Image (tube, rainbow, N blue to C red):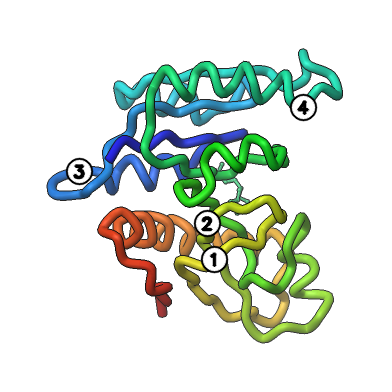
Amino acid sequence: KRVAILISGGGSNMVALVNSMTGDHPGRPVLVASNDPAAGGLAKAAAAGIATAAVDHRTFGKDRAAFEGALLHHIEAANPDVLCLAGFMRVLTPAFVARFEGRMLNIHPSLLPKYPGLHTHQRALDAGDAEAGCTVHEVTAVLDDGPILGQARVPVLPGDTADSLAARVLVQEHRLYPAALRNYLSGNRTPIALP
Ligand code: GRF
């Protein structure tokens, strides 16, 4: 299966996914695209020999549809079967989601349905949660809300800050996303839970 990955920044989740797509893995990376031409992940993808594209969303002002049209041009040229959002920080319109519904995944740094949206780690700390984690889910028109494909849990430790918790969760993101994608591409829809 042809997998395209959308990023906005350093792309550590993209790197984890690409590194997992070897041997008998059912997916292979055909494109890494970003809404930010300066995204550090673009250089990492290019160094790995993967086609890259960047569409600066800021040049489209408030015209989200125009930005997505430009992004879609690059995505369709790569003709992916599956789209993986990995640290992609733009909200996609229902029209865009509809084109990929049922074949678009995202990783979110909380144990959904808790804490959709931003600042997930601070919100978990403020709530006094004993544990936190990350979720891979299918993308639907409702933000951070689609069918859950996998979750990984971490303990919240005394003295944790949003940064220390984020770092602990990120390690699990890099384990969960490759496992959840492999499971998904194999046709399995039973959510996976990483200890
Ligand atoms: C991280 O905070 C991660 O939790 C979330 O997106 C951010 C950047 O990820 N998924 P990446 O390093 O660009 O993959």
CA distance separating discs 4 and 3: 35 Å
At x 73%, y 19%, the residue is: 66
Label 4 vs 3, first from the N-terminus? 3
Q: Residue 65 shows which numbered tag?
A: none
Amino acid tagged 4 = Arg
Q: Mark 1 or mark 3: which is in front?
A: 1
Label 4 vs 1, first from the N-terminus? 4
Label 1 vs 3, first from the N-terminus? 3
Q: Which residue is mark 1?
A: 147
Q: Residue 138 shows which numbered tag?
A: 2
At x 42%, y 17%, the residue is: 77
At x 64%, y 70%, the residue is: 112
Q: Are the residues at dot 2 and dot 4 in contact (C-beta closer than 8 Å)?
A: no
| Mark 3 beta carbon near ligand 1 (under 8 Å) | no
Q: Secondary structure at mark 1?
A: loop
Q: Secondary structure at mark 2?
A: strand
CA distance separating discs 4 and 1: 25 Å
CA distance separating discs 2 and 3: 23 Å
Q: Secondary structure at mark 3?
A: loop
Q: Residue 64 shows which numbered tag?
A: 4
CA distance separating discs 1 and 2: 5 Å
CA distance separating discs 1 and 3: 26 Å
> Residue extending furthest top?
59
Q: Residue 22 shows which numbered tag?
A: 3
- Pointer 2 local density, CA inside 10 Å: few below 14, some 14–19, many at least 20: many
Q: Are the residues at dot 4 and dot 1 in contact (C-beta closer than 8 Å)?
A: no
What is the x, y in percent for residue 42?
Answer: 49, 24
